[in-house]
Image (cartoon, helix red, strand yellow):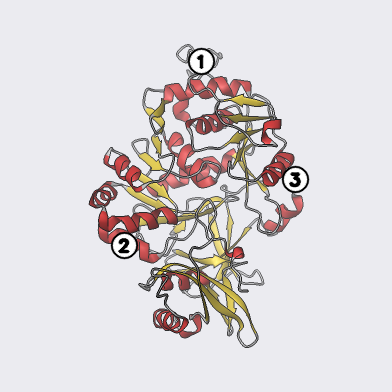
Amino acid sequence: MSSLFPALESPSEQLALRFGERSLTYRELAAASGALGERLRGAGRVAVWATPALETAVAVVATLRAGVAAVPLNPKSGEKELGHILSDSAPAVVLAAAGDELPSPVRDLPRIDVDVDADVDVDAGDSGSGSGSGLAPSAVGDEDPALVVYTSGTTGPPKGAVIPRRAIATTLDALADAWQWTGDDVLVHGLPLFHVHGLVLGILGPLRRGGSVRHLGRFTTDGVARELNDGATMLFGVPTMYHRIAQALPEEPELAKALGRARLLVSGSAALPVHDHERIAAATGRRVIERYGMTETLMNTSVRADGEARPGTVGVPLPGVELRLVEEDGSPITSYDSETVGEIQVRGPNLFTGYLNRPDATAAAFTADGWFRTGDMAVREPDGYVRIVGRKATDLIKSGGYKIGAGEIENALLEHPGVREAAVTGEPDADLGERIVAWVVPEDPQSPPGVEELADHVARRLAPHKRPRVVHHLPALPRNDMGKIMKRALHSD
């Protein structure tokens, strides 16, 4: 297989990675990852203590260049979850920055401290490769594992999705086509590096293109403005980040100017409310585009850089990705009318190969003819644009004979001036089957909008059968590290 990172084979003095004040050129990254990679030959799987630091990027690049699989570990995971992941993936070693203190059971593994200042004679190609990369070519194929990424376990312990090298290469190349992404682009983001969004798209993406990435360490609107004013061309974020940006824009004209200079603003990992889309566009003249992916599939769809940035949609299937919507009985929906809700199924080279040590879960995730069951519910516009309405397990509400997606109700609620945050779930109802329940963080906790006010607001915008019947007021919504609302934590007493 060709290299995942061609720019590391004949490395230059161009900036590759920058985390705060620390940075590496392609030549320095080739040296550091090459020296570490030689120590990892034949290791099978390697755990990476995935802090938002330069060492994490070097560790993952070294692991991939050595032809072994990286298992990113979330530093915020509890000991029980870490124990399960390590027991399941059985890594030979853990890679971490020299100063990192590792919890039990991670510290029971053999440890290699990542040296980002490896002194390797890359000009001479000391490993004998002749490539100037400091690492002999690895005999790996397209289907060989590159990453084992553990999905959040909502119905049991996390499952390890085995992502092959083929999926990383094809996804990043498809995004390059959709986003006109080149080596001239400079990406800024502040995403965690234990997940597909921050690691694969946010670190490996720029390196595959031969461009640069500047990681903020911790997301701030000041950091975003600084980097975009200093030549960054792309911003990746999750809805929580863009919501903070939208809130800050009226008081920060420099932020608005900086965002206006960006070539591409991309949001992912959850739906960006239409209200935030509109606030950002009005203040900056730039539209945020959304894309849709999962750990198991990497990226499936995106709004294209040369297409219409249509708020509330995740664009069209990426090159090479087949996508269909199916009814509850599995039969494909053949006519797209912007209203019919179905489950998304995808097929293509972007897919994972299976769940580690879980042939039962792997078999259940695929149809007999190779379509992956995403569990995400969507409608499709006649021109192919996809609009996700929620998860099948938590966001599809069957009320009064209708199939209703929670996402569109949430967007409608967020347009109410008295609503800061909103989530929608269903609960059993003897008459309707399920009734719609709204969980609202009010703008003014002393004067929250009531159920009749919000029901009328939604009914005017959508339809009467989509109005909430119950409203709960909360100080905050429960969210995970990626900013997704954890709806299973929401339940009526």
**Vertical position of residue 24 compared to residue 271: above or below:** above
The amino acid type, in three-letter code, at marker 1 is: Gly
Instruction: Give how far across and how far down residue 210 sits, in percent.
Output: 41, 32
Q: CA distance from mark 2 to mark 3?
A: 46 Å
Question: Visible in this render: residue 397?
Answer: yes
Query: Which residue in the protein does label 3 denote?
Result: 357
CB contact under 8 Å: marks 1 and 2: no
In the rendering, at what x and y percent does residue 482 appear? 51, 52
Foreground residue among 420 and 352: 420
Instruction: Write down the residue under mark 2.
Output: 279
In the image, taking residue 105 as reference, residue 231 lies left or right, namely: left
SS at mark 2?
helix
The mark found on residue 130 in the picture is 1
Name the quadrant containing residue 342: bottom right
Q: Left or right of 396: which side holds 367?
A: right
- In the shown orientation, is residue 256 left or right of residue 107? left
Picture residue at 62% right of the left edge, 52% below the top? 152
Quadrant of res 88: top right
Q: Is residue 284 visible?
A: no
- Residue drawn at (59%, 84%) of the image: 401
> Which quadrant is the C terminus positioned in?
bottom right
Q: Residues within 10 Å of mark 2 (few under 14, many from 20)?
A: some
